[in-house]
Amino acid sequence: MSSVKDRLKAELASSQSGASTSGAKEPTPPEAETEEKAKLQVLVSALSEEQLDTYEAFRRSKFPQSMMRKIVHTMTGVMPSSNCCIALSGITKVLVGQIVEESLEVQDGLKETGPIHPNT
């Protein structure tokens, strides 16, 4: 499973050499950016294989902006901006992660195994 660690290191290396993808952010000093990426690389190198798999799954998962746009438009009657959809996607991702984490804790408390499912 070292391929996960290799992919994450490659991703970090490519992000160090690439420019920022967001034009809206203020440019940060190169030293601060390099220091932050070095800290992230140290953290990633200290992760276990299971933690790396979880981190990789977290990084790759997302909610489509089109779905967020449709839900917000349906609920509010206002067409949200692209930045709003990106923010809502991130918040939704964190919320779903918390729900799944809590569900796993409840499942452990009930001494159940297998996939998470609602009680019906």
Image (cartoon, helix red, strand yellow):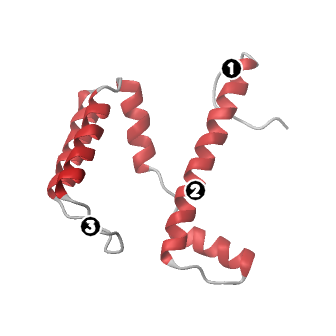
What's the residue at 48%, 55% (across, down)? Answer: 62
Circle 3 sits in a helix, a strand or a loop, which is it? loop
Disc 1 designates what residue? 108
Task: Answer few, some or many: residues within 10 Å of disc 1's Cα (few below 14, many 20 plus, some between 14 and 19).
Answer: few
Q: Quadrant of the N terminus?
A: top left
Q: Quadrant of the C terminus?
A: top right
Circle 1 sits in a helix, a strand or a loop, which is it? helix
What's the residue at 17%, 47% (across, down)? Answer: 13
Residue 110 is left or right of residue 68, and the answer is right
Kind of residue indicated by mark 3 = Pro
Q: Nearer the viewer, mark 2 or mark 3?
A: 3
Circle 2 sits in a helix, a strand or a loop, which is it? helix
The CA distance from mark 2 to mark 3 is 25 Å
Residue 32 placed where, x, y %?
23, 51
What's the residue at 19%, 44% (across, down)? Answer: 10
Q: Nearer the viewer, mark 3 or mark 1?
A: 3
Disc 3 designates what residue? 27
Kind of residue indicated by mark 2 = Ile
Instruction: Residue 74: name its quadrant.
Output: bottom right
The CA distance from mark 3 to mark 1 is 46 Å
The label number, if any, that marks residue 91 in the structure image: 2
Of pointers 2 and 3, the one earlier in the residue sequence: 3
Instruction: Residue 24: name its quadrant.
Output: bottom left
